[in-house]
Image: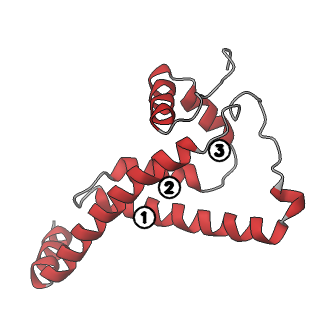
Amino acid sequence: MDFVNSFIKWFSDHPEMLMGLGISSIFIFLLSILGISWFVANIPDDYFLDSKRRPTKWREQKPILRLAVIFSKNMIGLLLIIGGLLMLVLPGQGLLTMVTGLLLINYPGKYRLERKLVSKPSIFRTLNWIRIKANKPPLKRNTTH
C-alpha cells in the first residue's frame, strides 16, 4: 500500500508527467486504430490458406532492407506493447494496443496464433468488414483448422 501512495504522491508532484502520459496514450490509441486498419487491409487475401507461412520474396531479393523492416516493425510492436501496458492504468485502449503490438512483432508460433484467432467467426467477420471498407477482397481461409 505504501508503494501505491508513493506512486500517487509522485504523480501529484509531477502533473506534467500525467498530462504527457495521457496525451501520449490518446495518440497511441489513435495510431493503433489506424494501424490495425492499414495492416488488415494489406494482408494478402490468401494469407491464411496455407498451414505454414510461405517465405516472402524479400528473403532472397532484398535481405538488408528486409532486416531493417523487421527490426523497425519489432521496435514499433515492442513500444505498442509497453504503451498498452501503461494504458492498463492510464487512459486509452491498453488491450487493443497490446494486441496490435503482438501482431507486429516476430516470435515462434505467431502464425499458428494468427490462424487460431482468424478461425473465430466474429474476428474473421470483423477483419473482412475492415477490408471491405478499404475496398480490398475478403480474406480466404481453410474451413478446417
Q: Quadrant of residue 141?
A: top right
Q: Quadrant of the C terminus?
A: top right
Q: Do the residues labelled 3 and 2 touch (CB within 8 Å)?
A: no
Image spot of residue 140 (x, y percent): 65, 25
Q: How crowded is mark 1: few (under 14 residues within 10 Å), some or many (20 or more)?
A: some
Amino acid type, callout 3:
Lys
Give the mark, 1 or 3, whose residue is nearer the N terminus.
1
Amino acid type, callout 1:
Ile
Q: How crowded is mark 2: few (under 14 residues within 10 Å), some or many (20 or more)?
A: many
Amino acid type, callout 2:
Gly
Front position among marks 1 and 2:
2
Q: Quadrant of the N terminus?
A: bottom left
Image spot of residue 96 (x, y percent): 38, 47
Q: In which quarter of the image is residue 113?
A: top right
Q: How far apart are marks 3 and 2 (CA)?
A: 12 Å
Query: Which colouring convention does the figure follow?
Result: secondary structure
**Residue at position x 47%, y 67% from top?**
79
Q: Which of 120 and 85 is in front in this view?
A: 120
Q: Are marks 1 and 2 in contact (CB under 8 Å)?
A: yes
Q: How far apart are marks 1 and 3 (CA)?
A: 19 Å
Q: Mark 2 — residue?
A: 101
The image shows residue 37, relative to residue 29, as above or below, that is: above
Seen in the image, is 86 located left or right of residue 107?
left
Image spot of residue 2 (x, y percent): 16, 71
**Residue at position x 58%, y 27% from top?**
138
Q: Mark 3 — residue?
A: 110
Seen in the image, is 95 located left or right of residue 74?
left
Tag shown at residue 82? 1
Secondary structure at numbered mark 3:
helix
Image spot of residue 135 (x, y percent): 52, 35
